[in-house]
Amino acid sequence: MNSSRYLLARLALSFGIHRKNKRLSEAADEMHLLRMAEEILGSDVWEQAEDIESISVEYWSLRKLSIRKKEIEQKVNEAGDVLDLSHEERNAILSRSNQACLALEKKRDELVRKSEALVAERDNVISKARQLRRKFDASRTKIQVLSEEEGTAEIVRDERRKLTNFKTEFLRLKDARDEVGERIAKLDELITRLEDTIAEDRSRLRQEASEAYQSIGKANRDVSQLTAEIGLIDLEMQEHYCEVGRHVSNHAGIDPVCRQICKDHSHLVAQMQSLRSSIALNHKLAAMAGN
């Protein structure tokens, strides 16, 4: 509010137009803007205010808080480095886990396929042995029947030769079945060992990954805690910035030190003085309206 608006508002008051709430609302908005401007000015110039006795508490408090903030920021950077390293370790573990397990699983799957092929081969041998057994039983029954008849001696001799051949072939199939069975047993043992190794690797890598995750969790907590500390320091510094900005802007016209400090911020100081004047006028009008 400038002087012209103030005069118009005074004139409106004489006609009973109070608008007290509007004046108070404008004053509150302007006070918020003024506080922001004081904080901005204070944050820019506080390091030049060492020799101003009136705000020496604020200056040295800001020096102390600034040092503390830098220390914490260094810790934040260190925690961030730990966090990045932990993420890299976790990613490396997961990548190593995938590659190792995939290689072992690929080898296991290959052995499983070979085992399945041998099982099929053994089943085929067993099937042939069963068919051979049926032929053997049929031939033996044939001999039993023909042996009681006359004129069948030659046929019986042929069937007995067949029985001998059947027995030889049956023994060969039995040996083949046993040989394939041994190969299957060896493959199954290898598969079991591989599965045990895969399980052990997964357990070990889960443990390693768990340690990496714990490091990540701790680093995140450290960063959060330190960031919260910086936030509290910033809030405290804002209060001191406002005090510094308020003092030097109020005394820029009468104190040579403050005038020198505010030299590069004259436009901002002028705006702050206008805001203070407007706030005072709005409060004055609101008080008059209340009466």
Image: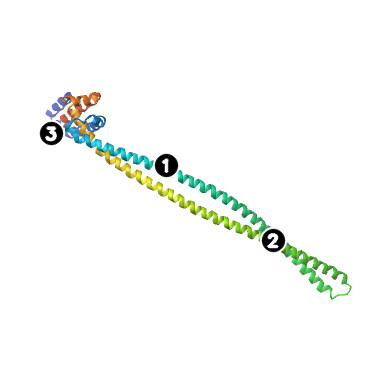
Q: Nearer the viewer, residue 101 or 142?
A: 101
Residue at image location 52% in from the left, 53% down from the top = 201
Residue at image location 77% in from the left, 65% down from the top = 168
- Say whether disc 2 or disc 3 marks the residue closer to the N-terminus: 2
Rendered image: mark on residue 179: 2
* Residue 56, x across and y down, in percent: 19, 34
Which residue in the protein does label 1 denote? 84
- Say whether disc 2 or disc 1 marks the residue closer to the N-terminus: 1
Mark 3 or 1, closer to the camera: 1
Neighbour tally class for label 3: few under 14, some 14-19, many 20 plus, Cα within 10 Å: some
Tell me whether circle 2 and circle 3 mark residues in contact (CB < 8 Å): no
Taking 40 as reference, is 83 left or right?
Answer: right
Which residue in the protein does label 3 denote? 287
* Residue 191, x across and y down, in percent: 59, 56
Q: Quadrant of residue 77?
A: top left
Tell me whether circle 3 and circle 1 mark residues in contact (CB < 8 Å): no
The colour scheme applied to this rendered structure is: rainbow
- At label 2, the amino acid type is Glu
126 is higher (above) or lower (below) than 147: above
Element type where label 2 sits in the image: helix
Q: Quadrant of residue 21?
A: top left
- At label 1, the amino acid type is Asp
Work out whether residue 19 can be spotted: no
The quarter in which the N terminus is drawn is top left
